[in-house]
Amino acid sequence: MIAVVRLAETVAGSAGALSRRLRLGGGTSIVGMVLNRLDPGAMERLAAETARRCVVLSGTNGKTTTARMLIACLAADGRSIAANTAGANLASGISAALLAAKRAGRRKDRNTGQETGRTGESVGVFEVDEAALNDIVRRLRPGLVLLMNLFRDQLDRYGELESVTERWVELAGSLPEDVTLLLNADDPALAFLGNGHPNTVLFGMADDHGNNRELSHAADTIRCRRCGEALSHDFVTVGHLGAWRCDSCGLHRPTPRFQASRVELRGFEGLSFSLLDSSGGRPEAFDVSVPIGGLPNAYNALAAASAARALGVPPETVSGALSQVDAAFGRSEQIFLQGRTLRLLLAKNPTGANENVRFVMSEESRLHVLILLNDRTADGRDPSWIWDVDYEPLLDRLDSLTLGGRRCWELALRFRYAGAPHDSFSVHERLPDALDDALSATPEGGTLWILPTYTAMLELRSELVRRGVAREFWETA
């Protein structure tokens, strides 16, 4: 049996190395695909061998960034980490990450020839696809499950939000009592998933920072889960998140144990807030500052800090780690090319895209924007969600607009309906052409904002790697 396991691991590792050598990808999934096929129990076995405990996190938006932040906190506390940092969040990616962690723990010191081993408590931190979550939790048996948000996304794959919510309700009801269930209280689809679970912890915003009381037309969860009536809000933050209540039946957002107040957004440069931790006998507040901007990233930092505190990381360690964390590939990432600053903001659903538009509009200067729309499986085959994105505010601020990707002509139609004259933007089906045109329209020393969907972002970064200004995403994860 041991020989079979070692053979499976060797063959899987070789498949990943070959994928990277042939530049077919980072080998972040194929390793796990081969391993799981040859050894169906590999994930469970490797988790038992590699990580003393596991953390699983999921949500529509922010998984990769939040995992990156949590890993930084745990590593600063001396924990050894196994993680799928490249974002491969299905069973194959998690198995591959566990195998990589096992092999890292066996590396030998070049000087002594002795196995270095792993230092500190070993923790697995895995972001997980929403639809795969139930199966992954069953197999990994994590000690903490973090659920961040639920927004409309990839309807052709997930279905409507209610279908995902019902799966998550089933998951919450199946968790052992000693598992910590960490939920976003600001999301009415999630806040009460932990009812009946004795170890439920909530996080949320104490204020909105912008005094926004109106839901956008693209908001998703707008009705009470108990009585079905429309929800009201004391404030709205991102999408349908905020301080919600039902005036019909009295259901309202529960008070979170971890609350972010005095949120200060500093554009692309970063953000800060005060985190109130009520988990002890006496509430304790400490400051958090993150060099990544945007209100969604305030939620990501709040979720990561809450999870870190729930895992026993001291407040000062959390603050120090988050102050040094950098952006994940394609998510508020900044790259320099031909004397221009490229700012990449991934979005693959209406809520994410609307937040990106709001973020870009927070800049006071005139704007140069490249939007890339694909319709591959990881993007969602149906691109009709772009009609729920409020692109209109951009029009009065644009100096140049370039549209690209497999569905660039749908974007062109969307902007024509928004009121953009046909000669006010350019359209290119080939990504290199779109990038070149957008660069030429951006003055030297200027900033080009790039808003891609997921696979368009990967294609863009591959092109930037080819041009010598970026590293492969699996090398930066």
Image (spheres, rainbow, N blue to C red):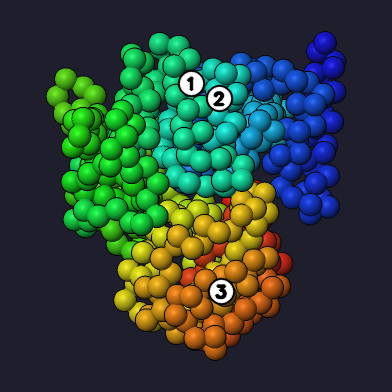
Q: Is residue 424 visible?
A: yes
Residue 133 in the image: above or below residue 391? above
- The residue located at (22%, 44%) in the rendering is 232
In the displayed structure image, the side of residue 275 where residue 131 appears, left or right:
right
- Residue 168: percent from the left, percent from the top? 47, 27
Residue 270 vertical placement versus 93 (above, below): below
Q: How many marks?
A: 3
Answer with mark 1 or mark 2, whichever residue precedes in sequence.
2
Question: Disc 3 to disc 1, how far (Cα)?
Answer: 41 Å
- The residue labelled by disc 3 is 413
Quadrant location, the N terminus: top right
**Image coords of residue 13 (percent x, y):** 78, 34
State how far apart marks 3 and 2 are (Cα): 39 Å
Q: Quadrant of residue 18?
A: top right
Most foreground residue, 365 or 163 = 163
Residue annotated with mark 2: 134
Q: Earlier in the sequence, mark 3 or mark 2?
A: 2
Residue in the image at 37% along x and 35% along y: 189
Report whether residue 202 is seen.
no
Identify the residue at horizontal 32%, vertical 34% (top origin): 228
Mark 2: which amino acid?
Asn
- Label 2 sits on a secondary structure element that is helix
Local crowd at mark 2 within 10 Å, few (<14), some, or many (≥20)? some
Q: On the image, numbered disc 1 is attached to which residue?
A: 170
Q: Secondary structure at mark 1?
A: helix
Circle 3 Cα neighbour tier, 10 Å, few/some/many (<14 / 14–19 / ≥20): some
Label 1 with label 2: CB-CB less than 8 Å: yes
Give how far apart the Cα atoms at labels 1 and 2 are.
Answer: 8 Å
